[in-house]
């Protein structure tokens, strides 16, 4: 799953291919990262193929994932007065205050790719939900801090849904 995620992120431009190939002697010969993410040619360089500093995804990369039909669950973290019912197409509403049972019902696979978003850069809900999911053992959680406002400003379509209480 990690390799699939890495390849998907490279495909949409979120992670440059050079970052995947960095410090791998195999890259000079084959042009591809080692299949396990660890350089087989030089065990001293044993490290993940991609070192992600922050688990974020920008609006255009998210739009690309959706356009390419990469399996991803998109979660709108807004609730109450902050939820105006506008959604990124296909997004589900899940509040950072959701119970563990509600999270489990919405996300049965802890290895699946999940993207959280909220209103905009000033809104902390997507980060709070992302942290909650990681603490519950979800392995592939990305946060979109541009939120619904960034999505709309970029000219992407939205869906209307009932506001989440």
Image (cartoon, rainbow, N blue to C red):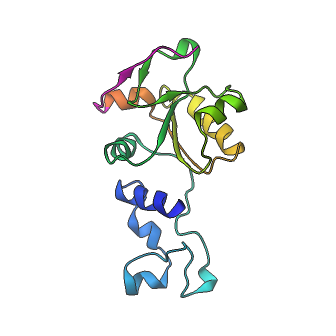
Give the x, y percent position of residue 115: 50, 40
Q: Which of 150 and 79 is in front in this view?
A: 79
Residue at the (41%, 20%) spot, across then down: 86
Q: Is residue 160 magenta?
A: yes
Give the x, y percent position of residue 110: 62, 47
Residue at the (49%, 39%) spot, across then down: 73
Q: Which span is picked out in magenta?
A: 154-165
Q: Position of 91 compared to 68: left or right?
A: right
Q: In this view, does 62 lie above or below 94?
A: below
Residue at the (41%, 53%) spot, across then down: 14
How many marks can you see? 0
Q: Is residue 131 above or below residue 49?
A: above
Q: Which residue is most to the left?
A: 155
Q: In this view, does 114 lie above or below 42?
A: above
Q: Does the magenta stretch include residue 63?
A: no
Residue at the (40%, 62%) spot, across then down: 16
Q: Nearer the viewer, residue 8 or 119?
A: 8
Q: Position of 99 compared to 155: left or right?
A: right
Give the x, y percent position of residue 71: 44, 47
Give the x, y percent position of residue 132: 68, 37
Residue 124 in view: no
Q: Dominant secondary structure of the magenta stretch? A: loop
> For the C terminus, which image quadrant?
top right
Residue 2 in view: yes
Q: Which of 23 and 137 is in front in this view?
A: 137
């Amino acid at each position: 799953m990690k390799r699939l995620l890495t390849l998907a992120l490279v495909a949409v431009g979120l992670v440059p291919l050079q970052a995947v190939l960095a410090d791998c002697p195999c890259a000079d010969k084959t042009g591809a990262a080692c299949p396990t993410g660890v350089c087989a040619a030089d065990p001293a360089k044993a490290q993940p193929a991609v070192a992600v500093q922050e688990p974020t995804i920008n609006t255009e990369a998210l739009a690309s994932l959706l356009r390419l039909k990469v399996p991803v669950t998109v979660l709108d973290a807004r609730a109450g007065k902050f939820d105006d019912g506008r959604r990124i197409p296909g997004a589900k509403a899940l509040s950072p205050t959701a119970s563990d049972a509600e999270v489990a019902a919405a996300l049965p696979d802890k290895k699946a790719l999940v993207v959280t978003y909220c209103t905009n850069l000033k809104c902390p809900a997507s980060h709070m939900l992302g942290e909650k999911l990681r603490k519950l053992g979800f392995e592939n959680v990305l946060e979109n801090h541009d939120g619904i406002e960034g999505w709309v400003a970029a000219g992407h379509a939205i869906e209307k849904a009932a506001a989440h209480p």
